[in-house]
Amino acid sequence: MNLALRKLSKLDDLRFFQMMQEMGPGENGFHNSMYGLNPNQFRHALSGADKMSRGLFLQPQFVAQTSYWLMLDDHPLGLGKLRHELNASLRERGGHIGYAIRPSERGKGYGHVILQLLVEEAGKRGMNEVLLTCLEDNFPSRRVIEANQGILHEIKNGICKYWIHITANKLPKRDYLAEALERDRKAKEAKKY
């Protein structure tokens, strides 16, 4: 089994469309702009996300961001977004990184994995630190961020702001990739019996 990030492509197929519909309109600060689209609209949205990753045709309120799928072999598990820089709005809510795991795959450690991999991607882009935000009462997200060496900077208007220093994050405290794969393997074995 292979668990990895894959960059979003304008050629992605209906597996990704189905996952985005399963995720619903969004929750806990994550907005799913691909929810409720038909397959043709979804293709158009993928094209727009591809252009956004290259900084093309951005509206003034947006920054360039690269979107990634978290994949287990050929099965999409989640979506992650890495914003290349921050504007004033993202400094308050949104930060550099946003991610969501499809509901049918939650509780298996994939949130830890996608964040760890997105932080690694930020490091490859030359970023030294990244800001993540989450709702104050979103304790699962707070645990994921803190487990990935997120340091709480402040809580303001119900929003937690965490910084992850990438140079200090080169050696993660735990191997979330291996743990998630092992949990998935055990779950599949249990279904056989």
Image (cartoon, rainbow, N blue to C red):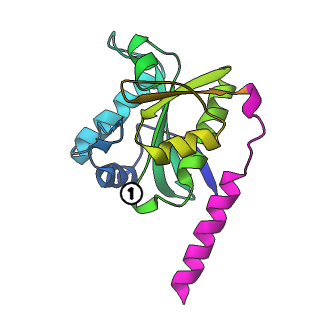
Quadrant (top left, top right, bottom left, bottom right) of the N terminus: bottom right
In this view, the residue farthest toward the bottom is 193
In this view, the residue farthest toward the right is 171
Nearer to us in this view, 125 or 138: 138
Q: Which residue is mark 1?
A: 103
Nearer to us in this view, 49 or 79: 79
Q: Amino acid at mark 1?
A: Pro
Region rendered in magenta: 167-193
Q: Relative to 38, is 127 above or below? A: above
Task: Residue at 25%, 47% (x, y): give it.
Answer: 39
Task: Residue at 32%, 43% (x, y): give it.
Answer: 27
Q: Is residue 22 left or right of residue 93?
A: left
Q: Is residue 38 left or right of residue 89?
A: left
Count of numbered marks:
1
Q: Relative to 151, is 85 above or below? A: above
Disc 1 crowd, CA 10 A, few/some/many (<14, 14-19, 20+): few
Q: Is residue 50 left or right of residue 125?
A: left
Query: In what element is the residue under mark 1?
Result: helix
Q: Where residue 18 appears, x then y in whole percent? A: 33, 55
Q: Is residue 45 visible?
A: yes
Q: Is residue 97 left or right of residue 182?
A: left
Q: Where residue 190 appears, x then y in whole percent? A: 56, 82
Q: Where residue 22 appears, x then y in whole percent? A: 31, 55
Task: Residue at 51%, 41% (x, y): give it.
Answer: 142
Q: Is residue 1 visible?
A: no
Asked if residue 169 lies in the magenta stretch, the reply is: yes
Q: Relative to 121, is 79 above or below? A: below
Q: Where residue 130 appears, x then y in whole percent? A: 59, 24
Q: Quadrant of residue 6?
A: top right
Nearer to us in this view, 77 or 132: 132
Assign the magenta stretch its main secondary structure: helix
Task: Residue at 34%, 13% (x, y): give it.
Answer: 61
